[in-house]
């Protein structure tokens, strides 16, 4: 009986430790990215151009810079982990002479998606922020996937 009395509190301490270790894990966002990549490549015959995973906190934003080729029409999706309810995605062209970003489009949703058809080889900026965190959260991981139709499947 004494062993039982010692093991039960130990079990709850271990479970609490496991939960605190997994509360900020990237495993769920990695699993979601893996599932979406498989779907895009195998089912929709898309070619992944870029994947970015990062952490957003409070009112912060992340910027990803990428040159896009005018011979492709691109789609970009952004989504968050279990702590992010709504993510905002903005896409703009970088004016290299002034350093300013000329906004092209923006969208906010559980999964934000924007289509881009570059007219020439230019540098684009993808700006990701959170519109709504899950209640009690102020930080979360996000993923952004940039892709276009796979030329080998046309």
Image (tube, rainbow, N blue to C red):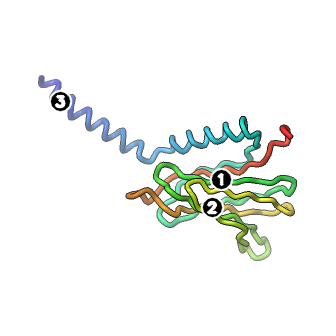
Q: Quadrant of the N terminus?
A: top left
Q: How far across and how far down the image is residue 48, in percent?
A: 73, 45
Looking at marks 2 and 1 on the same chain, the residue that comes earlier in the sequence is marked by: 1
Farthest residue in the bottom direction? Answer: 98
Q: Badges 2 and 1: C-beta atoms under 8 Å apart? A: yes
Q: Residue at horizontal 44%, vertical 48%?
A: 24
The residue beneath circle 3 is: 6
- Residue 31's label in the rendered image is none
Q: Quadrant of residue 115?
A: bottom right
Which mark, by number, is residue 77? Answer: 1
Secondary structure of the residue carrying tag 2 is: strand
Q: Residues within 10 Å of mark 1 (few under 14, many from 20)?
A: some
Which one is nearer the viewer's eye here, 41 or 18?
41
Instruction: For marks 2 and 3, give the CA distance.
Output: 51 Å
Position of residue 138 in the picture relative to residue 65 (left or right):
left
Residue 65: % across, % down? 71, 60
Considering only vertical position in the picture, is 73 above or below 15? below
In-image side of 7 versus 16 (left or right): left
- Badge 1 marks a residue whose secondary structure is strand
User: In which quadrant will I find the C terminus?
Assistant: top right
How far apart are the two marked residues, 1 and 3, measured between alpha carbons?
50 Å
Is 56 left, or right, of 127 in this rendering? Answer: left
For the residue carrying disc 2, how many other residues have a C-alpha within 10 Å: few (<14), some (14-19), or many (20+)?
Answer: many
**Of callouts 1 and 3, which one flags the residue occurring earlier in the amino acid sequence?**
3
Q: Secondary structure at mark 3?
A: helix
Quadrant in which residue 94 is drawn? bottom right
Residue pointed to by mark 2: 89
* Cα–Cα span, label 2 and label 1: 8 Å
Count of marks placed on residues: 3
Check the image and report above or below for 9 versus 112: above
């Amino acid at each position: 009986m004494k062993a039982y009395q010692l093991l039960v509190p130990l079990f709850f301490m271990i479970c609490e430790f496991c939960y605190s270790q997994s509360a900020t894990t990237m495993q769920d966002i990695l699993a979601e990215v893996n599932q979406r990549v498989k779907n895009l490549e195998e089912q929709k015959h898309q070619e992944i151009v870029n994947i970015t995973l990062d952490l957003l906190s409070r009112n912060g934003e992340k910027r990803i810079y990428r040159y896009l080729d005018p011979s492709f029409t691109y789609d970009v999706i952004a989504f968050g982990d279990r702590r992010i309810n709504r993510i905002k995605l903005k896409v703009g062209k970088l004016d290299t002479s002034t350093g300013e970003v000329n906004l092209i489009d923006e969208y906010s949703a559980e999964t934000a998606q924007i289509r881009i058809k570059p007219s020439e080889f230019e540098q684009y900026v993808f700006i990701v922020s959170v519109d709504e965190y899950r209640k009690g959260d102020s930080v979360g991981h996000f993923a952004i996937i940039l892709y276009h139709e796979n030329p080998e499947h046309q």
